[in-house]
Amino acid sequence: ALRRIEEARRSHSVFDAGVPFHTIDTQNRAVLGLVRENENEKFIGLYNFGGERCTVCTGETGLYTDLVTGEAADAGNVPLEPFGFRWLWKETPAHP
């Protein structure tokens, strides 16, 4: 998993140092949600600091790619393992 994370950080401009980020309300005190977005990409990082499995509603719609597993993921309802995390990414169309 660490290699995939390192590769994701190198491959996607949304991880550049100057890209702003903000937190999102995950409705779960044990889960931290971070969003990074630029003109081409959107990233949602979800981090479960609790010892129980949970599902997080992010308020997002559509499919994202899980950067760790490479699988498609529904960003609206994201399952998290105890002490687990998910890195969700999608391309965003350029706005004219």
Image (spheres, rainbow, N blue to C red):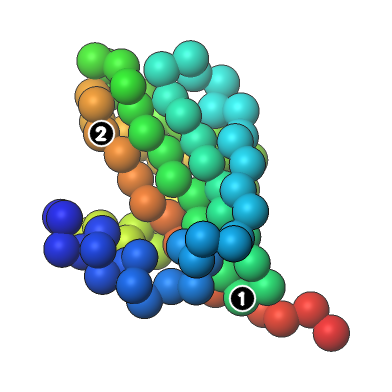
43 to 35, vertically: above or below: below
Q: How many marks?
A: 2
The foreground one among 12 and 85 is 12
Secondary-structure class at tag 1: loop
Check disc 2: other Cα within 10 Å, few if <14, some if 14-19, many if 20+: some
Check disc 1: other Cα within 10 Å, few if <14, some if 14-19, many if 20+: some
Secondary-structure class at tag 2: loop
Give the mark nearest the N terminus, 1 or 2.
1
Task: Return the residue found at the far right.
Answer: 96
- Residue 48 lies in quadrant: top left
**Residue 95 seen from this side:** yes
- Please give the name of the residue rendered at 61% of the width and 28% of the height, measured from the top-left corner: 25
Residue 24, given in percent of the width and then of the height, sits at 61, 35
- Please give the name of the residue rendered at 61% of the width and 75% of the height, measured from the top-left corner: 40
Does residue 41 appear left or right of residue 32 in this picture? Answer: right
Residue 68, given in percent of the width and then of the height, sits at 25, 58
- Residue 27 lies in quadrant: top right
Residue holding disc 2: 84
The foreground one among 64 and 20 is 20
Q: Quadrant of the N terminus?
A: bottom left
11 to 28, vertically: above or below: below
Residue 67, given in percent of the width and then of the height, sits at 32, 61
Residue 40: assigned label: 1
The foreground one among 88 and 20 is 20
What type is the residue that disc 1 sits on? Answer: Asn
What type is the residue that disc 2 sits on? Answer: Gly
